[in-house]
Amino acid sequence: MKKRIGLIAILILIIIFRGNAQNWDIDNAKSINPENPNSSYWKITSGSAYFLSAAAPVYFITKGFIKNDLVLKRKGYHIFSAITIEFVASELMKQGIDRKRPAESYPAEIYPYRNVSGRSFPSGHTSLVFATAASLSIECKKWYITLPAYAYACSVGYSRIYLGVHYPTDVIAGAAVGIGSAYLNKWVYKKIFGQKNRVLYTIKI
C-alpha cells in the first residue's frame, strides 16, 4: 500500500514539475479536441460522471437496507467515503496549483464545447469516476464489474480532453488521485477495524 501511494505521489510531482511536458500536453490536447466538439456521446459520457458515481454507493446502501444486510451497507459507506477523500484531495490540489483551463491559456488552439472557467488541475470528473471504479474493484473483486468500471472511467477522462476543458495531464492526475483515494480509504478502514472486517472485501453480489 505504501509503495502504491508513493508511486502515485511521484507521478503527481512529475506532472506538476512538467517543464517541457507543457508542449506535450497542449499538442495532445489539440490532437484530441476538434474545432467543433459536438459529439453527443462524449457530452453524455462526461455529464453522467456525477450521477453514476453517486449511484454506486446509493445502490449498495439501498440494497443493504432492503435486505437488512450490514455488509452491503458498509460497502456503500466505503465507496462514499472514498469519493469524499477524492473530493477533498482534488479540491485542495486545484486550489494549491491554480492551473487555468486550456481554452483560457490557448484560446486560439483549444475549442471548448461551452464556456467554462475555474481551475483545471486535476480533472475533478476524472478523479471522481476513477475513485468509484477503484472502490468497486476493491469491494466486488469481479472482472465483469471492474473492467466496465475502469473502461467507463477512461471514457470520462477522454471526454474531458475532447470537450476542450482539460489537458491530458489533468486527466492523468485525476486518475491517480481517484485510485489513490480508494486505496487510502481501504487502508484507513483496515487500520480502524482490523482483520475482523476482511469479509467486506470479498462478498459476492
Image (cartoon, grey):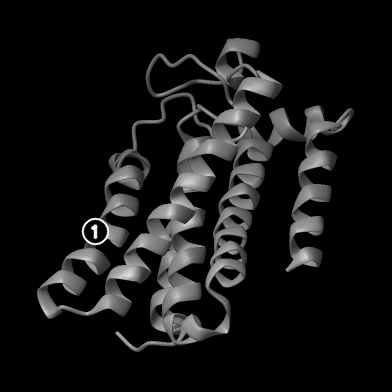
> In the image, is residue 179 above or below residue 44?
below
Q: Is residue 80 left or right of residue 89?
A: left
> In the image, is residue 27 above or below residue 185?
above
Q: Is residue 129 visible?
A: no
Residue 54 place in picture, x, y as percent: 30, 51
SS of the residue under disc 1: helix
- Label count reads 1
**Residue at horizontal 84 percent and vertical 41 percent from the top:** 14
Q: Nearer the viewer, residue 28 or 70?
A: 70
> In the image, is residue 143 above or below residue 129?
below
Q: Nearer the viewer, residue 31 or 123?
A: 123
**Quadrant showing the C terminus:** bottom left
Residue 30 place in picture, x, y as percent: 62, 30
Residue 160 place in picture, x, y as percent: 48, 37
Q: Is residue 68 visible?
A: yes
Label 1: few (<14), some (14–19) or many (≥20) C-alpha neighbours in 10 Å: some
Residue located beneath label 1 in the image? 58
> What is the three-letter code of the residue carrying label 1?
Val
